[in-house]
Amino acid sequence: MAKRKEELKVIPLGGMSEIGKNMTAFEYGNDIIIVDVGMAFAEESMPGVDCVIQDYTYIRENISKLRGVILTHGHEDHIGSLPYFLREFKCPVYGGKLTIELVRYKLHDKGVSLQGIDLQAFKNGDKVKLGTNFEAEFIRVNHSIADSYAIALKTPVGNVIHSGDFKIDYTPINGKTIDLQRFGEYGRDGVLLFLCESTNIEISGSSPSEMQVGESFERIFKNAEGRIIVATFSSHVHRMQQIFTAAEKYNRHVCLSGRSMITVFNVANSLGYIAMKPDTLIDISDIDRYEDNEVVILTTGSQAEPMSALSRMAYASHKAVEIQQGDTVIISAHPIPGNEKPIYRVINELFKKGAQVIYESLADVHVSGHAYINEIKLLHTLVKPKYFVPCHGEYRMLYKHAKLAEGLGMPEENIFILNNGDVLSIGKNHAKIVDQVPAKAVLIDGSGASNPDDHVLSDRRHLGEDGCVSIGITVDDATGELACVPSVNSIGFVFDDEKETIHKDIGAKAMALLSQGARKHDYIEAEVGTRQFREGIRTMLLDKTKRRPMIISTVSHIDSRHM
Ligand SMILES: [Zn+2]
Ligand SMILES: [Zn+2]
């Protein structure tokens, strides 16, 4: 029997029908390579969860094939779960300079040993061989973090291009425009498969240049009379640069606030990515030595994260900075969808304290790092792929991106909207979803990992909504009787003024339920564990309060003969 011809398998383990935890495995013969290993933030329905990562079962089962991880750029949704991944699997990691340094810092911070992990930095046009079947090339793109790349993969069946996160900026801050020419060359030579991000597929036209934000900063800096406080994403090195540039132009010094801001600044500065005069940067503890109009504070907290520096300033719990009359605060970011409320709360607080607050809806103090429709169309036109997989988007975005590709002339059957875990098998002239591998979300909290079906999460939601009632029952072993009235406590269940009455009612109900039996201590102990007992309490509480708190009952023993 003739050996079946090998095909390229494309397996997204995250990043499909979601924005976050991007990770795609490419497999051919004996080689598997992975593009990006990002994390997702916990959703509101996951109380107490720190972050969400991918299911690594498929990698675990095929570990002997793993040849390396390629990173498109240093955002959390592309590198965030690497520490979890590299703790278990040792392999080389390739990426741009800033990306690799951020990963090095992250691994160190999370206590992951670098032993057996080869971190290698690449630049535009660099190529690296992975196994016998893959060669990857880094193609420069523009994005909201320096050193962002698309990845071109040479495989035995043809070329694959993964866009990474990108935009087309004709006037980027560092002068390095996306390498459109290289995309065009690949298009001319033939591209079998294109994976392209879909974040802004719903926005028509082209995204404004980062340069525009610099012009807004200059206008604001020129007119501000007091201190200037700018909150932005700590990873946005170009934005950071624009703030330093505007500060120097208007004779201001810059200080940094917030752990991640300081970390990324130090990494970027050590790579020579921040152009500034040596005395521009000052320590935040020294700001009182300068006049208000000589100071810029660059801070984290543009998403109103509760513990971030800006939130602490707004609520007067920051060690070095208290908001005062005359301050100008610029929120140089777009609220992550769903996060608007806490941001407006912080903005209200800043206004109350006498600051002028400038945010996106008032001025151009932020532009997106992701391509709008026209830019996406341009990349499709240059790459001219045979097959297409939209990625980095919720389902409706993937759908719209698929429609866009169809509109550009691609046959519908050559476009695949994949689920996480789908195995897309591609030959030179055909492509098909052939299998599914495990790709459920894995939730990480302080103590470990679990999956979303775990009852712990539904318990947490239950507790959060209806609170908890505890019933402590004490049995006297001498008599087998209840030693005293059950002690009742509750948290998050009823308001204080109702508490006493309800607690009494619960105690009485518990006694009534237990006295229906023979009151032998083993009987009482057994009775407390029954469904009947729990349901009896539950029904009474539902009648009286219309709530269903979690009920925890415990039995303890005393012996009055020994007292
Ligand atoms: Zn990104
Ligand atoms: Zn991303």
Image (cartoon, grey):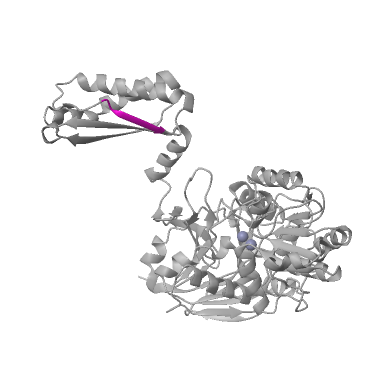
Could you tell whether 563 is left or right of 204 in the image?
left
Task: Tell me if residue 232 comes above or below residue 90 in the rendering.
Answer: above
Q: Name the one closer to the observer, 190 or 511.
A: 511
In percent of width and height, residue 391 lies at 59, 57
Look at 64% across and 45% down and name the residue there: 342
Could you tell whether 540 is left or right of 428 in the image?
left
| Quadrant in which residue 212 is drawn | bottom right
Residue at the front extreme of this rendering: 563
Look at 43% across and 26% down and name the residue there: 499
| Quadrant in which residue 141 is drawn | bottom right
Whether 488 is among the magenta residues is: yes
Query: In this view of the protein, can residue 383 be seen by the observer?
Result: no
Task: Look at the image and tell me in which quarter the N terminus lies.
Answer: bottom left
Whether 111 is among the magenta residues is: no
Q: Name the one closer to the observer, 361 or 412.
A: 361
Give the residues drawn in magenta, as a range. Answer: 485-490
Task: Tell me if residue 135 comes above or below residue 429 in the rendering.
Answer: below
In percent of width and height, residue 221 lies at 84, 61
Task: Tell me if residue 352 comes above or below residue 57 in the rendering.
Answer: above
In percent of width and height, residue 375 lies at 75, 60
**Displayed-image quarter of ligand 2:** bottom right
Could you tell whether 499 is left or right of 176 in the image?
left
In percent of width and height, residue 135 lies at 55, 78
Look at 18% across and 28% down and name the residue there: 524
Query: In this view of the protein, can residue 162 be seen by the observer?
Result: yes
How would you classify the magenta stretch by its main secondary structure? strand
